[in-house]
């Protein structure tokens, strides 16, 4: 009986990795993660930023691949306005070798990523943020020396085709922040592959 109870509790605990994650309005913690160039990157690495587009993503997931060009587009459109993209891969590379640090570096070079692509090796940052999918976006707004969560969820409303998108959630949220307003839509359901947690 005790073994069964322990197993149930273990399953519940594993499903709650993201349950205690951020909500809109929370202050996001900083991090220090290794970029594909070998350097450590944090939110503090962007002192002139007005905010940050934090995208939990990876190499292997078909949804992440489908959104790859759109993530690059977000950085190109908004980094100059103070909202750069920082991509973070939280997946277990033992389970998915395609998501290894070495393959992250290859992918970044092949696709000419204009943003930092960081490896969350311990998965601690993904858990603290409450990320569950790849891709999963956390749009942060800088307030003094802190970053507040302004939007959480999907990049837009169509994971299959960029041409069929009707609602560009992240772009609309940034447009609101730039004008000093609160995003009309602040949370959506992230659509993508489940994060591959370590066992």
Image (cartoon, helix red, strand yellow):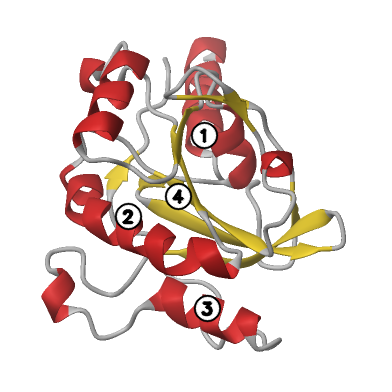
The 10 Å Cα crowd at callout 2, few under 14, some 14 to 19, many 20 or more, is: some
Q: Residue beneath label 1, please?
A: 12
Nearest to N terminus: mark 2 or mark 4? 4
From what the image shows, is residue 189 above or below residue 113? below
The CA span between labels 2 and 1 is: 36 Å
Residue for point 24% across, 20% down: 96
Indicate the quadrant where residue 27 lies.
Answer: bottom right
Q: Which residue is mark 2?
A: 72
Query: Is disc 3 surrounded by few (<14), some (14 to 19) or many (20+) residues within 10 Å?
Result: many
Report the mark closest to the observer, 2 or 4: 2
Q: Quadrant of the C terminus?
A: top left
Observer able to see residue 93: no
Which residue is pictured at 24% across the width and 23% down the height? 106
**Residue 68 percent location from the top left of the image:** 25, 51
User: Which labelled disc corresponds to residue 32?
Assistant: none
Residues at badges 2 and 1 in contact (C-beta under 8 Å)?
Answer: no
Q: In the image, 63: left or right of 19?
A: left
Q: Residue at x 12, y 76 (%)?
A: 163
The residues tagged by marks 3 and 4 sit, at their Cα atoms, a distance apart of: 15 Å
Circle 3 or circle 2, nearest the eye: 2
Name the spot of residue 165 as percent of width and height, x first.
21, 79
Residue located farthest toward the right when viewing the structure as drawn: 144
Seen in the picture, residue 167 relative to 31 is either above or below; the reply is below
Mark carried by residue 55: 4
The mark that comes first in sequence, 4 or 1, is 1
Identified at 42% across, 24% down, the residue is 36
* Residue 23, x across and y down, in percent: 66, 61
Q: Nearer the viewer, residue 177 or 182?
A: 177
> Camera-side residue: 32 or 97?
32
Q: CA distance from mark 3 to mark 2?
A: 17 Å
């Amino acid at each position: 009986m005790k073994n069964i109870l322990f197993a149930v509790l273990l399953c519940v605990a594993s499903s709650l990795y993201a349950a205690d994650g951020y909500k809109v309005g929370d202050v996001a913690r900083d991090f220090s993660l290794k970029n594909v160039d070998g350097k450590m990157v944090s939110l503090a690495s962007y002192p002139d930023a007005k905010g940050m587009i934090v995208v939990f993503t990876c190499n292997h997931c078909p949804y992440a691949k489908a959104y790859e060009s759109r993530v690059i587009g977000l950085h190109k459109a908004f980094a100059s306005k103070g909202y750069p993209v920082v991509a973070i891969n939280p997946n277990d590379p033992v389970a998915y070798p395609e998501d290894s640090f070495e393959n992250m570096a290859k992918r970044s070079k092949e696709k000419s990523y204009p943003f930092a692509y960081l490896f969350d090796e311990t998965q601690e940052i993904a858990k603290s943020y409450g990320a569950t999918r790849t891709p999963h976006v956390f749009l942060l707004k800088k307030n003094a020396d802190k970053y507040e969560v302004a939007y959480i969820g999907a990049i837009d409303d169509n994971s299959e085709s960029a041409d069929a998108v009707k609602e560009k959630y992240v772009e609309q949220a940034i447009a609101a922040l730039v004008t000093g307003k609160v995003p009309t839509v602040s949370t959506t359901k992230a659509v993508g592959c489940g994060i591959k947690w370590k066992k």
